[in-house]
Image (cartoon, coloured by chain):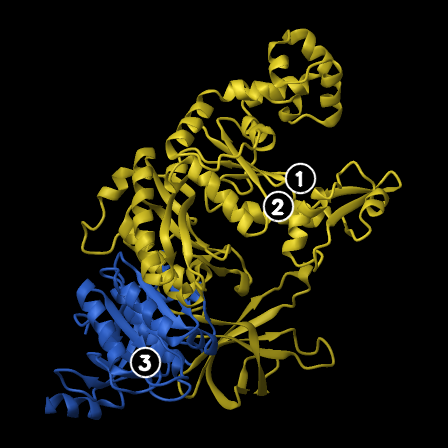
Chain colours: A yellow, B blue
Amino acid sequence: MSGARWLAIYLPRLKTDRLIRAGRGPSDDRPLAVYAKEKGALQLKAVDLRASKLGLNLAMSLADARAMQPKLEAVEEDLEEDARALDNIAAWCERFTPIVVVDPPEGLFLDISGCAHLFGGEEKLRTEIVTRLRAQGFASRAAIAPTPGAAWAFARYRKQERRPQQTLRESLQASLAAAEDWQAELAALPVDALRLDPNAAALLRRLGLKSVGQILHAPRSSFAARAGENAMLRLDQALGREKEALTPRRPPPPVFAVRRFLEPVFTADVVLQVTQDLCGDLIEKLDVRGAGILLVELVLFGVDGRDRVIGVNVSKPLREVKPLMRLFREKLNIVGENLNAEFGFEAARLDVVRLAEFDERTQALVSVEASASEEQIAGIVDVLGSRLGAKRVVRPQVHDEHAPERAAGWRSALGKGGEDEPQTPPKDGVQRRPVRLFSPGQQIEVMASVPDGPPIRFRWRRVMREVVRAEGPERISGDWQKRERTRDYYRVEDKQGRRYWIYREGFYGESEAQPHWYVHGLFA
Amino acid sequence: MAAQPLHEIGPAGPGYEAAALGFTLALAASWAGSAGVFWAGEDAAFAEEGAPYPVGLAQYGLPLDRLIVARAKKREDALWAAEQSLAASGAVVICALGAQGKPLDLKASRRLLLFAERYSSRCLLLMPENGPSAAWTRWRIAPAESDADPDELGLPAFRAELTRSRGGPSGAQFVVEWHAHERAFAERVQKKCEPVFYADAREA
């Protein structure tokens, strides 16, 4: 865990802030509170700043609060909405680092290891987050520490000393000191700072253990037996003795690169330039790992708080800027009009979502032959897919099936597929299957035919066609489980030499109705 | 013809689209090297005449393991896809356009020609209408009747007319049969329509 840096965000007034932000707070200067039904009584769950200044607190019931402040505006608690608001904030925070952990009900963890320098240092990053959250209507406190537990504790229990006229030097010294003494500082905090449930914290206090430090120095075994494993675990996590597994909101990309812009970026040209820089950063990191890219996502963070994600799929592991940029250029060309960069973008991040082992040896063979290599073709397929869509760039597939419709299909040309066996045309050169197939077959009107034989004339697409040659029938029985009927196929040629693959479904005399005829395909 | 990078192929009349495609596919199959065949087309070009059917394509001689089909919603996307595919050196690219829409302008076909020349690939432009084009040759294709026993269908056969040829005579007519197994065309021994062909050939 050496070098890990965690930033914890605490949103003490999330419940009321989100209501006010959504315009659901009081329109005048009345105080606002959120309540919920608890054991038959209506209990206050959150109060806004005004209510808190007027002396309302969470120990009160709604009735008590109303008695004190008759003008109190009260809204019932909506836990789902609260969770959604927290998740939205978490999503917004992903512009600072891809690893954001939601810590309900009112906290977040950001893994800022190795990220802070992009924002001018840890303190700048912390202030920026708090300031910008406030600008969006959310009161917050944030703190940075080597463990999530300690950051959590500092965000909530560190004394908010006001240092209005602090010089840069002083603040630097202060933060340096804080960095060194974080364990000592943690020890001075009350036991509640250990993320304990209220009962456990109350028990500790009854035992006379008020601060983290007292627990720290208490004999471990007896203490653990009395206060439970949980408190010890939390303590160890906060001190970094025990690793804490947190699940980020989104699976973190194995490799990523971030760029921030000094001023908002609007045009696709600049986005492209930044993307190219990011690709360079990324490839450098991949070189170290000996890996290649399979799927990358460009995340553009809008100043308005909305993100756009542009994904690029590659069929063979890639580790070069040029082909990657070719794909992005195509993608951005289409997305370009819909970038919606109304307020501009403030940051961009390039995530490798999927990577694969990169084989140096296969790469060395590229472009030795005059004919395009497999890699080049894979590259072209990627480009085609990025503009047309992966489903529109396909390779043929032949299945071992009797029914003509199921005997063949198409699969995306992107990515690896089963190696197709080369099919050889028949020796006699006679075409038994058409090059194009209608699915389903198109019904035709048969004008004259011998029973159990091919038609003599038929009408298809409003044109009468006279059959001069016919070969068949080739009987293909349907899947009886799917109630498909037996078909008799004929290959027929009309007077002009056009050739059709037609079939009759069912037999003559099988029922009252005449059997139907269909054109299923066209021969070249 | 094989030496030139861009050829235009179209049906000789309404209802002959399948024949024009057959002729195109046959050329593609006979030229396909290790780089394979790209078939880029507008949705309209695919929908009208039925979807390409791999089993039949294999019988026709196309290398299924080296065939890539790209379907585009719009004509400009189909042309773009063809251009991109031409970057595969040695490949044969079929660019199939639908019957609807404006005739192709000279610029578009010139671009295809440039791409094909640069990467030494080949482009077969399959489109129904006439228009100015940078293609080396323009072919109008109709089906030809089978040359086989009365109760059999013979080899795929085409009546191909060379309606335009840069640096050569045009107007020549051929009746050719496609030998899928050998991946080669063979001219059918003529019974009826020699005069047209020889007349033109003599002029040249």
Q: Residue furthest right?
A: A40
Q: Quadrant of residue B3?
A: bottom left
Q: Is residue B153 above or below residue A266?
A: below
Q: How many residues crowd around disc 1 within 10 Å: few (fewer than 14), some, or many (20 or more)?
A: some
| Amino acid, disc 2 | Leu
Q: Provide residue A181's location: percent of width, then percent of height.
A: 48, 20
Q: Is residue A257 left or right of residue A61?
A: left
Q: How many residues crowd around disc 3 within 10 Å: few (fewer than 14), some, or many (20 or more)?
A: many
Q: Provide residue A422's location: percent of width, then percent of height.
A: 36, 54
Q: Is residue A214 above or below residue B121?
A: above
Of the numbered discs in the image, which one, if any, rests on residue A30? Answer: none
Query: Which quadrant, please, contains the N terminus of chain B?
Result: bottom left
Q: How many residues crowd around disc 2 within 10 Å: few (fewer than 14), some, or many (20 or more)?
A: many
Q: Which residue is mark 1?
A: A105
Q: Is residue B191 left or right of residue A340?
A: left
Residue at (22% x, 60% y) in the render:
B89
| Amino acid, disc 3 | Phe
Lower sequence index among marks 1 and 2: 2
Q: Are marks 1 and 2 in contact (CB under 8 Å)?
A: yes
Residue at (35% x, 63% y) in the render:
A267
Rounded to the nearest angstrom, the CA distance separating label 2 from label 3 is 70 Å
Considering depth in this image, is A154 or A50 the residue closer to the camera?
A50
Q: Which residue is mark 2?
A: A86
| Amino acid, disc 1 | Pro
Q: Quadrant of residue A424?
A: bottom left
Of the numbered discs in the image, which one, if any, rests on residue B158? Answer: 3
Q: Provide residue A371's location: percent of width, then percent of height.
A: 22, 56
Q: Is residue A198 above or below residue B178?
A: above
Q: Is residue B54 above or below residue B15?
A: above
